[in-house]
Image (cartoon, helix red, strand yellow):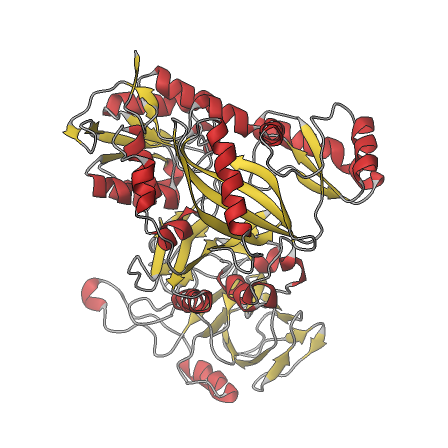
Amino acid sequence: MRRLINSGTARFPSRNRARLGFRGYAMFDKLLIANRGAIACRILRTLRTLQVKGVAVYSEADAASLHLMQADEAHSLGEGGAAGTYLAVDKILAIANASGAKAIHPGYGFLSENAAFAQACEDAGIAFVGPTPEQLRVFGLKHTARALAKQHGVPMLEGTELLDSLESAIAAARTIGYPVMLKSTAGGGGIGMRVCRSAEELADSFEAVKRLGQNNFSDAGVFIEKYIQRARHLEVQVFGDGQGEVLALGVRDCSVQRRNQKVLEETPAPNLPYGMAEELCAAAVKLARAVNYRSAGTVEFVFDSEDQRFYFLEVNTRLQVEHGVTEQVWGVDLVSWMVQLAAGDLPPLDQLQAGLKPLGHAIQARLYAEDPGRDFQPCPGLLTAADFPPADGRTLRIDTWVEAGCEIPPYFDPMIAKLISWAPTREDASAGLIDALNETRLYGVETNRDYLRQIIADAPFASGQPWTRCLEDLVYRADTFEVLSGGTQTSVQDYPGRLGYWAVGVPPSGPMDNRALRQGNELLGNPEGCAALEITMSGPLLRFNTDAVVALTGAHIPITLDGQPCAMNTALLVSAGSTLSLGTIAGAGVRSYLCVRGGLDVPDYLGSKSTFTLGQFGGHGGRALRAGDVLHIA
């Protein structure tokens, strides 16, 4: 059974309600979040404000996630990756029914733009907190979204309908003119997009992009658009009531991207031509009104920096990862609006809009467990330290799902947190974001924190003139060295080590030959207690990503730097890119020490950086080093 809710809201299934809200309808008692990580925690924050009980679901790989602890109840989806957990529609609907949840918020990613899931929710009498299934279908495929935009006069890039063969693609590209962008019609997140600068590149990419679409989104459809050489990625946050009323909340700039994946986002978009922001918002509202859009959505545009014109790109029918910057500038809670609309409890949009006024500037950085020094490969593993600066929710907002002891699983997007800085000016917001990143302390997995700091200081972003490929010219600098081979047992130790905890069952730990460790630090001008590597029997093979000065002390061990023998007990200059090889100890003693000028950047545990391997704490992950580890120089 379905009914039409009062003007200003949309159509949702009837459901049991308890507490009366703004329109006399009752807010949901309980809502299920069909997602994980930072967005699950973000939605729960709003549910607490609305006094709605939150139901969490989780993969067993996420068993330590904060969203489980913050929810009123949590239900396991089983072991494994997304297909058997966060994409398992039958499991999620069964949990919703068993828990008594009357609504489902899909967050972003996973099932958030899945029309079949939205329809299944409504068929089951459960409110899908988002657009209608039909809107998800229309905008879910880029070629149908383009057709609708063209029909309503939204500026379009020159492009094609779906292409049925390579021959038709080559003919179309010849007409449009190279370079072109070959795109999968389904999905998003930068998957299935290739820039082609010639017929040869188009021929090489055609089947590959079709396969990506089929494998990731079960749709092999592809089309071509004209490629803008120096493009900015601009987007408008819209919100519709499902009855034809739509409001726009400014323009975000998401031009700082790596391989079509957003890295930094901000609002308002800086340095736009006079009147351009208003034109973008008008175009976005016009398109959303054409379908009586319901709930939160984003209309994306590409802006040609050379001819100063914008063109329609696509519509994201969900809450965006970067929604927080809009919330900070406009002083709204988009998640609350989405839930209230789904409950029939949202005030009319014209009433909401009357009190809206943007204030200041907000910038968001996406903090990932990935290694920029190794082609951004994901870095799953145990977070042994997770310390963020104090966040007041206004000048600094941190959306995260982790704390020390959380495991970053290998199955899902490796985002750790979103840091959002707000200030009256762009310059102050940027400075605040740098400060927040400087004060963020994560250890146990590699992250892109230093990469983010370098981007913010780099000219394209600092000048407010970024473009979608500006990061290609940024050379990442890492004050690190990589472990290519760990040796027999190589661990981090400091002086005097960890003392005074016998009463709680923790024996002393630290260097076995503290005199040798202190001697090495003295050679380098370090404080004598600086953390260093203790090498037992056979040493590691290390590759340095930065210039460094090191010293080897203790038992005699063969040393080669890029194949050339080196002496012990003296300061050695190691150039970035060089490999330091430590052999097998010969003669008296079984332990040597590798000290680095500045020391090793390792968190303290019970007052020391020393590794206690039996207790599995301290040092680098509480264990001996192994191949693939990355250590930071302080």
- The residue positioned 70% from the left and 48% from the top of the image is 228
Camera-nearest residue between 288 and 489: 288
Q: Is residue 100 above or below residue 287?
A: above
Q: How many marks?
A: 0
- Residue drawn at x 38%, y 65% is 424
Q: Which sits in the foreground, 86 or 178?
A: 178
Residue 560 in the figure: left or right of residue 271: right
Indicate the quadrant containing the N terminus: top left, top right, bottom left or bottom right.
top left
Q: At 59% from the left edge and 83% from the top edge, which residue is drawn? A: 568
| Residue 102 found in image quarter | top left
* Residue 295 showing in the rendered view: yes
Let me know if residue 64 appears in the view: no
Residue at the outermost top position: 1
Decide if residue 82 is on the left or right side of residue 481. Answer: left
Residue 524 at x, y percent in the picture: 52, 86
Q: Residue 566: percent from the left, percent from the top?
A: 66, 81
Q: Is residue 73 above or below residue 487?
A: above
x then y, percent, for residue 272: 56, 57
Q: Image quadrant of residue 256? A: bottom right
Q: Residue at x 52, y 33 (%)?
A: 287
| Residue nearest the viewer, comparing 9 with 430 | 9
Please state the horizontal and vertical placement of residue 618, each as a whole percent of the image.
Answer: 37, 64
The picture quadrant where one finds residue 512 is: bottom left
Which of the two residues, 42 or 306, is positioned nearer the viewer here? 306
